[in-house]
C-alpha cells in the first residue's frame, strides 16, 4: 500500500508513485486493449465481416473485388460452402453475407441477384 493520490483543498492530485505506475502500465494496457479489438483512443475497432459462398466464386470474383477494402483495413472472415447450409448458418447469425447460388426460401432473408450462372456441357 503506497499512496497514489494526495488530497487537496479542491480534489486530488496523483503522487509521483502514481505517475510512475501509470507510465509503466500504459503500454501493456494499450496492447491488451488493441488485442481485444479496442482502440486506446476510445473507439472500438469493428469486427470482421463474415462472408460465405461457393469457393470458386469467392476466390475468382468476390475476394479480388474486395481487396481494396481489405487494404483500407476492413477485416474479412471467409467461409466456402454449399448454399443451403450457408443460408441456415446465415439465419443463425454465423455469417453477415452469403453469396448463394439459389434464392433463399422463406421470408427471413432478403436477396439481390448478383449474376446469372450459365452451365455449359
Image (spheres, rainbow, N blue to C red):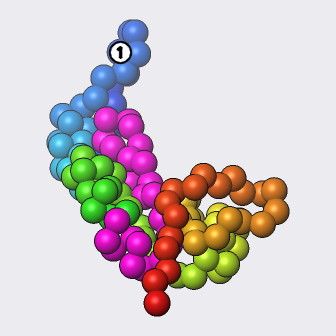
Q: Tell me which segment is drawn in magenta.
A: 34-61
Where's residue 17, x and y in %?
21, 40
Residue positioned most to the front: 121
At 26% from the left and 38% from the top, the residue drawn is 18
Residue 20: where, in percent of width, then height?
17, 42
Which residue is rendered at x = 61% and y = 76% of the image? Answer: 83
> From what the image shows, is residue 99 above or below residue 24?
below
- The answer to which image quadrant residue 23 occupies is top left
Q: Position of residue 26 (x, y in %)?
A: 24, 46
76 or 41: nearer the viewer: 76
* 28 relative to 92, above or below: above
- Seen from the viewer's position, the closer of residues 28 and 51 is 51
Front in this rendered view, residue 3 or 63: 63
Quickly name the residue at label 1: 8
Dot 1: what SS? Answer: strand
Q: Which residue is farthest bottom?
A: 121
Residue for point 33% across, 31% down = 5
Q: State yes or no: residue 40 in magenta.
A: yes
Q: Please tell me how crowded label 1 is: few (under 14), some (14-19), or many (20+) other residues with Cα within 10 Å.
A: few
Identify whether 44 is placed above or below 61: above
Coordinates of residue 8 in the picture (x, y in percent)? 35, 15
Amino acid at each position: 500500500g503506497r499512496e497514489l493520490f494526495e488530497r487537496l483543498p479542491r480534489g486530488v492530485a496523483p503522487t509521483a508513485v502514481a505517475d510512475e505506475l501509470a507510465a509503466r502500465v500504459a503500454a501493456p494496457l494499450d496492447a491488451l486493449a488493441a488485442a481485444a479489438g479496442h482502440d486506446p483512443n476510445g473507439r472500438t475497432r469493428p469486427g470482421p465481416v463474415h462472408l460465405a459462398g461457393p469457393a470458386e466464386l469467392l476466390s475468382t470474383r468476390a475476394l479480388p473485388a474486395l481487396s481494396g477494402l481489405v487494404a483500407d483495413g476492413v477485416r474479412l472472415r471467409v467461409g466456402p460452402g454449399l448454399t443451403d447450409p450457408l443460408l441456415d448458418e446465415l439465419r443463425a447469425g454465423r455469417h453477415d453475407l452469403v453469396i448463394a447460388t439459389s434464392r433463399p426460401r422463406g421470408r427471413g432473408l432478403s436477396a439481390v441477384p448478383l449474376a446469372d450462372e450459365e452451365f455449359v456441357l
